[in-house]
Image (tube, rainbow, N blue to C red):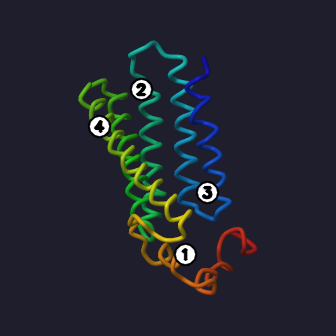
Amino acid sequence: MLRPLANPLPLGFLASILGFLARDPVAGTGMGILAATWAAVGLVTLRSSFGTTSHALGLLLLASGTAMLVPALGALESKLVPALVLATAAVRLLLTAIYQLSGVTGWKIAGGVTGVILCAFAFYAATAFMMEETSLRSWLPLVRRSAGRRAITGNLGQQLEHIASEAGVREQL
């Protein structure tokens, strides 16, 4: 009965916590938004009849899709591939929200197609990050810029240059 909540929810929240612990607010925020959204979708799905739409769920997905644009914009400065994944997730949430609010099947199909594209982008990003982490070099382009590039190619001094002004290090936010 609680299966829609049991699979993605704990993993999403864990990924969010690990993102923040790794000092990556983009990953932490993005995964936190997705985990909270999955929790709400799971609860609504448990309480709804099969095949029905929900205006409340549509409003929640509209808010989640809009909120997902924040980490997408945050990643745009330094990591273009993660920015693309997060922006595509935002579009998918927004299309699904429109379907929930309108009930028009075309929006449901558009959301599903966007979900397949999102899956491909996320698979590419996960593969690229995993290959980079395990081999200590980039095999697939992640299109890193500025701080994102410095994190991989810079020396320790360059990587720690701005750490004193980061949240969690400075005295107050």
Q: Which residue is mark 4?
A: 113
When the figure is inspected, residue 69 is found, relative to residue 46, above or below; the finding is below
Give neighbour class at mark 4: few <14, some 14-19, many 20+ (Cα, 10 Å).
few
Q: Which residue is mark 1?
A: 151
Secondary structure at badge 3 equals: helix
**Picture quarter containing residue 111?**
top left
Q: Earlier in the sequence, mark 1 or mark 3?
A: 3
Q: Earlier in the sequence, mark 3 or mark 4?
A: 3
Q: Which residue is mark 3?
A: 19
Q: Earlier in the sequence, mark 2 or mark 1?
A: 2
Secondary structure at badge 2 equals: helix
Residue ID at (50%, 22%): 45
Cα distance in 3D space between marks 2 and 3? 32 Å
- Quadrant of the drawing holding the C terminus: bottom right
Q: Amino acid at mark 1?
A: Ala
Q: Position of residue 133 (x, y in %)?
A: 55, 64
Q: Nearer the viewer, mark 2 or mark 1?
A: 1
